[in-house]
Image: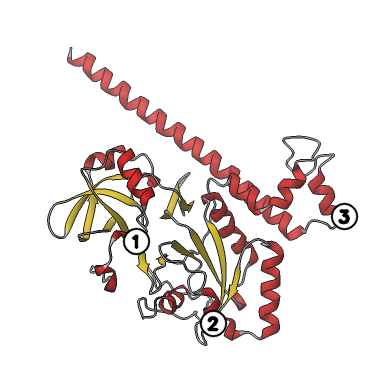
């Protein structure tokens, strides 16, 4: 499978966001003898790394793979890595430089595991289409992921040419009511309406990551921001009203104004993982009310003296917000329990292997 990167071939590390902070991390981790590059593509554990000298298809070392305990320990798009170049097109990844941010979600169908979406992100563009695709709870899920990752969220409402002005304002009002501190931009990929304001947000040298379901217009957004046709675009299925997957891998692009944008496959499921801080930040209204609850371990369900329930009953707290908070709180607790159980099983298996080797040694004697 061959990938094309276009004008990124002529870029230097500074164009990919390398700065004094990255140089300092290189020194602090004793990596002066390695070449530094950034992972610009990941596809089924295949990596493309960009350095000052070119692009390299890369693999991790055997010791790297052996020491990686979890999926987060492997390279991801956006990572700065220390490599050695074997020839003009192939390199070995030895180490990942410490990440300053990481966007992840609960891995689909994998017990107690997280899936890394992208790393070293400054801003997340949460892309949501209007009409059938508009879903406040899904937006809120993405917001929890961003707040957990210490990444600044920006909501982009797409396909506004499909609705009238009143419907658009209604959607914007709903978003601003639930996410008052988050910037929101309404755009049309067909008419280009709203792009003049969105482009002002994209800063040179900053890294942005697109989050959203299939069919919301992420590929069109990338093409319009880059000024050229980079990604294929698809349409919504008329029979299922669901978007078709166009992007099949994660890839980093440099836009014409110098901004750095990471594209991701559309996500049908947005499972949250380690998100305690993200929940508190996203649902700050509930968190602030909980500080005055009678019990410190209040679950905000049936307890006497619960300020959250009191606020819900008198209409000050939205029931939709409360219900979604409770649902996500249960998901968080389930994920944390899954992680603990998984670690116990891994520890027990490790102990069994260790005892097996001890018995073999005794039998040999």
Secondary structure at badge 2 equals loop
Image vertical order of residue 179 relative to residue 161, above or below: above
| Residue 295 figure quarter | top right
Query: How far across and down, in percent of the image, does residue 79 sit?
Result: 35, 53
Q: Quadrant of the C terminus?
A: top left
Mark 2 surroundings within 10 Å by alpha-carbon count, few (fewer than 14), some (14 through 19), many (20 or more): some
Q: Which of label 2 and label 3 is nearer to you?
A: 2
Q: Which mark is residue 314?
A: 3
Image vertical order of residue 113 relative to residue 127, above or below: above
Secondary structure at badge 3 equals loop
Query: How far across and down, in percent of the image, does residue 98 sit?
Result: 38, 44
Q: Which of label 1 and label 3 is nearer to you?
A: 1
| Residue 31 figure quarter | top left
Tell me the CA gap for discs 1 and 3: 51 Å
**CB under 8 Å between callouts 2 and 1?**
no
Label 2 or label 3, whichever comes before in sequence order: 2
Which residue bears the numbered disc 2? 188
Label 2 or label 1, whichever comes before in sequence order: 1
């Amino acid at each position: 499978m061959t990938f094309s990167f276009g004008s990124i071939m002529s870029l230097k590390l500074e164009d990919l966001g390398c700065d004094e902070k990255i140089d300092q991390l290189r020194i602090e981790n004793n990596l002066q003898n390695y070449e530094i590059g950034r992972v610009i593509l990941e596809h089924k554990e295949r990596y493309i790394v960009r350095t000052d000298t070119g692009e390299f298809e890369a693999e991790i070392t055997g010791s790297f793979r052996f020491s990686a305990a979890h999926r987060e320990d492997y390279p991801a798009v956006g990572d700065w890595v220390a490599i050695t170049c074997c020839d003009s097109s192939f390199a070995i990844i030895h180490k990942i430089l410490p990440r300053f941010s990481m966007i992840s979600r609960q891995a689909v169908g994998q017990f107690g595991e997280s899936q890394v979406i992208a790393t070293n992100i400054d801003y997340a563009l949460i892309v949501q289409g209007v009409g059938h695709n508009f879903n406040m709870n899904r937006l809120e899920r993405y917001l929890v992921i961003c707040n957990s990752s210490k990444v600044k969220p920006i909501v982009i409402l797409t396909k506004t040419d499909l609705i009238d002005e009143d419907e658009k304002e209604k959607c914007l009002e709903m978003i601003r009511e639930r996410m008052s501190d988050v910037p929101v931009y309404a755009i049309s990929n067909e008419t280009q309406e709203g792009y003049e304001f969105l482009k002002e947000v994209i800063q040179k040298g900053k890294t942005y990551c697109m989050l959203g379901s299939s069919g919301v217009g992420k590929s069109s957004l990338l093409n319009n921001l880059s000024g050229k046709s980079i990604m294929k675009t698809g349409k919504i299925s008329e029979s299922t009203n669901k978007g078709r997957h166009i992007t099949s891998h994660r890839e980093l692009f440099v836009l014409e104004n110098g901004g750095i944008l990471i594209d991701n496959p559309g996500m049908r499921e947005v499972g949250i993982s380690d998100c305690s801080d993200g929940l508190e930040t996203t649902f700050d209204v509930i968190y602030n009310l909980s500080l005055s609850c009678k019990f410190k371990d209040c679950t905000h369900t049936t307890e006497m003296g619960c300020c959250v329930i009191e606020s819900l009953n008198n209409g000050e707290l939205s029931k939709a917000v409360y219900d979604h908070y409770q649902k996500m709180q249960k998901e968080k607790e389930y994920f944390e329990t899954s992680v603990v159980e998984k670690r116990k099983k891994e520890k027990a298996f490790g102990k069994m292997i260790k005892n097996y080797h001890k018995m073999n040694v005794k039998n040999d004697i």
